[in-house]
Amino acid sequence: MLKRLAKNTTVLSLGTLFCRILGLIRDILIATYFGTSKILEAFIVAFRIPNVFRSLLGEGFSDSVATPVLSEYHNQRERLLTLGRRLFSVSLIILGIVVILGILFSKYLVIAIAPGFLKESYKLSLANIFTKITFFYLFFMGLVAVMCSFLYALKKFALPAFVPSLFNISLICGILFFHRYLHNYILVLSVLVAGLLQFLSLYLYLASKKMRLTFEFRNSFKDKDIIRMFKLFVPRIWSSIVYQLNIFVDTIFASLSWIVGSGALAAIYYANRIIQFPLALIGISIARVAIVDLSGFYKENNLEDFKKVLIFSFQNILFFIIPITFLFLFMAQEIIEVIFVHGKFSTYSLVLTYPVLVFYSLGLFFFCGIKLLVNSFYSLKDTLTPAKTATFALIANVILSAIFIFPLQVAGVALASSLAGLFNFLLLYHLLIKRIGLIKWEGSLWEVVKLFILGVLTAGAAKVVWMILGYNKYIRIGLSFLAGGIIFLLVGLFLKLRYFIYLKRWILRR
């Protein structure tokens, strides 16, 4: 069971890694051509608005409701296909209505999440136009999420893992080849093309496997499982809105340029892009694979194996995230300098961005842990509890942002998000234990202590090498990471960490 879980996680993580590497290239190009400009800030706001609905009607619906329910019919292909077609048809209608309303009210949505734009008419006008276009992207991505849920239920993770790479490929090609002709609009048009490409790739794949999700409106709204999905989804709507409001808290406070300085929205964006790399690669990948097995074990009332999957998933998160966190804490400025300081991304942009990354890093483990805990509740068919805890976290985020924004400016917004993440994580864990009983971690605490030692020594070695070398920044960062990697391996073996023991045994068997 755990080997299969590890294999599926690896497949999804490799796809995510490929996507994030392309995303890194994309962000380098965005930084080079747009820096912390008004065009980029307008795009960030415009893209964030449909992402609210995408989180709600796309990945939010997929992860919390569609995948757990569809997974129940893994061994009943005909029923699974019928249910997939009906869900696809219902989603088509709902998404169409949302897109029309979003286009009609785009200006008011922009003002709601970026009130600071009222004082800058150029940014407000651009963001309004961008928002109208990105709502079409939402339409495609909502249908993509349904198809991904269908494939997850079949335990096919490869294509859903690699398809998101088309988003980055579209933006990279758009910026490189069409930036000269469509400077103001290239980002938003590339996003629209990306949505269409992702939709077509999944739809044609399913058609080639004789699993085309055709339209089946008859009986779709009467299907007992469709009705059950939407009943479960009502609390998830609340949870998704609260989650997006948490993101909007960052956007709203960062848009107050007279307090946090010009370009703060872009600083939040760039720091978030770096944080999203390990979050998606490790936290989200592990949580998405785990939910399929967690749902199955809960249906069978097998809480023992449920807990084993949960422990195994947390151990994976800890092993990767703790060293990465220390690397971000020790080398935030150097990482941002190497990745983003090109073209219009100036020294001012660097100084503005790196403290944001430092404070976001403090919450990285909790952000990943929340993904796993929330999916654990979804596997229990409980979408209400995560909504409640997210609401309390939102209130904490608002209060803490208002407190920290004055002494720390935009970095205070990031610190508030991390502390709110800690609060949400602890609350979720406490409530999960009340539902499933105590979890026996059996030596995991000592393993965490060793990971902290490993993380400090690894990041410290990388930092020292950076400081003593005088080569250009690309050679320095490469040698720094090489030194950190060597220390990571040697110290991990010396401390006899569980994963290094597994790796040693695997090599010896080979």
Image (spheres, grey):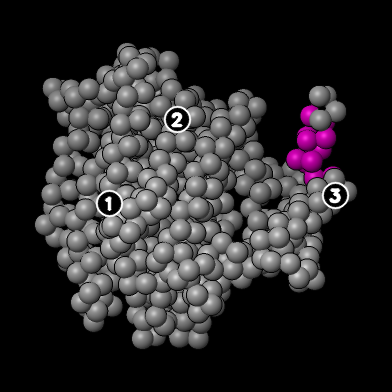
Residue at x 56% of width, y 72% of height: 354
Q: Earlier in the sequence, mark 3 or mark 1?
A: 1
Q: Earlier in the sequence, mark 1 or mark 2?
A: 2
Cα distance, mark 3 to mark 1?
48 Å
Could you say which is closer to the camera, residue 426 or residue 11?
A: 11
Could you say which is closer to the camera, residue 224 or residue 17?
A: 17
Q: Earlier in the sequence, mark 3 or mark 2?
A: 2
Question: Residue 248 has which mark?
Answer: none
Q: Which residues are magenta?
A: 496-506
Disc 3 to disc 2: CB gap under 8 Å: no
Read off the residue under disc 2.
Answer: 159
Cα distance, mark 3 to mark 2?
36 Å
User: Would you place residue 296 above or below residue 208 in this image?
Assistant: below
Read off the residue under disc 1.
Answer: 189
Does the image show residue 277?
yes
Classed neighbour count for the residue bearing mark 1: other residues with Cα under 10 Å, few (<14), some (14–19), many (≥20): some
Q: Does residue 504 show up magenta in the picture?
A: yes
Q: Which of the 4 image quadrants contains residue 107?
A: bottom left
Q: Secondary structure at mark 1?
A: helix
Residue at x 46% of width, y 64% of height: 32
The kind of residue on which mark 1 rests is Leu
Question: Residue 490 has which mark?
Answer: 3
